[in-house]
Image: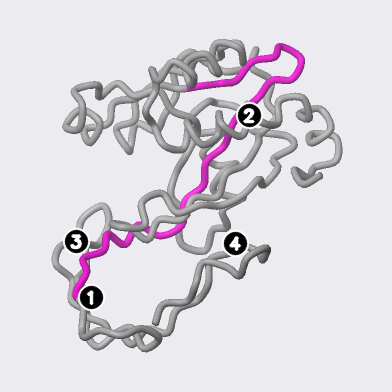
Amino acid sequence: MPRPLAPRGGPIVDAPAEVAITDHEILATGFRSYQRFRFRRVDADGGPQTREVLRSGPAAAVLPIDLSRDEVVLLRQFRLSAHLANGKGNLVEIVAGHVEANETPRATAQRECVEEIGVAADPLIELFSYLTSPGLSDEEMTLFLGIVDASRVPPRAGLAAEHEDIVVVPVPIDDALAALAGGTVHDGPLIVALQWLALNRGRLSEIAHTGAASS
């Protein structure tokens, strides 16, 4: 039988599962690999199961904040998936990218800051990680807070080799949180980051000073 969520009064935590993978095949390759797995849950009743998984792997995102200007640095770029989903392909986002081979999420976060908004973050503080779409993909996103000088960001950025055409937009934190409350932005990492910001805005200076997000 599946394990219960938690004993009453106990911690609510993700837990390992006993899984026997009997077979897997690559269905397609491209920007990422799409694979089919056949497996059996050893720790639960039931027979063999089959699932398809997009093997996206680890990724990193950065919420760039300028404390002196009380601004967050957002960016806008075209996403075909967003266009297909709701017709609004010019998506508002934060800095984000996939972790490359032999790279840590922190190194990815700093590299993407320079590539996507034209400035490095100092300090760069790890906040938490989450699975972006566990029913479809194994992508695990690590979110960082990055302290930046918004006066130095260029109006456009991105790597020409990756066909990136990014518009960089520093905005007041109040405006970003108003967009969150109004439901006018739909990018997952942006929404998660702004929810964190709404909860922790009063602690930003302390977090930047100590380099740690935990109380």
Work out how far the residue at label 2 is from the one at label 4, CA to CA, in angstroms.
23 Å
Work out how far the residue at label 1 is from the one at label 3, CA to CA, in angstroms.
15 Å
Residue for badge 3: 29
Magenta stretch encompasses residue 55: yes
Residue for badge 1: 37
Report if the CB atoms under discs 2 and 3 are less than 8 Å apart: no
How many numbered marks appear? Answer: 4
Residue type at tag 3: Thr
N-terminal label among 2 and 3:
3
Secondary structure beneath label 3: loop
N-terminal label among 2 and 4:
4
Quarter that holds the C terminus: top right
Secondary structure beneath label 2: helix
N-terminal label among 1 and 3:
3
Label 3 or label 4, whichever lies nearer to me, is 4
In the image, 74: left or right of 124?
left
Residue occupying the point 57% across, 44% down:
143
**Badge 2 density bin: few <14, some 14–19, many ≥20, Cα 10 Å:** many
N-terminal label among 1 and 2:
1
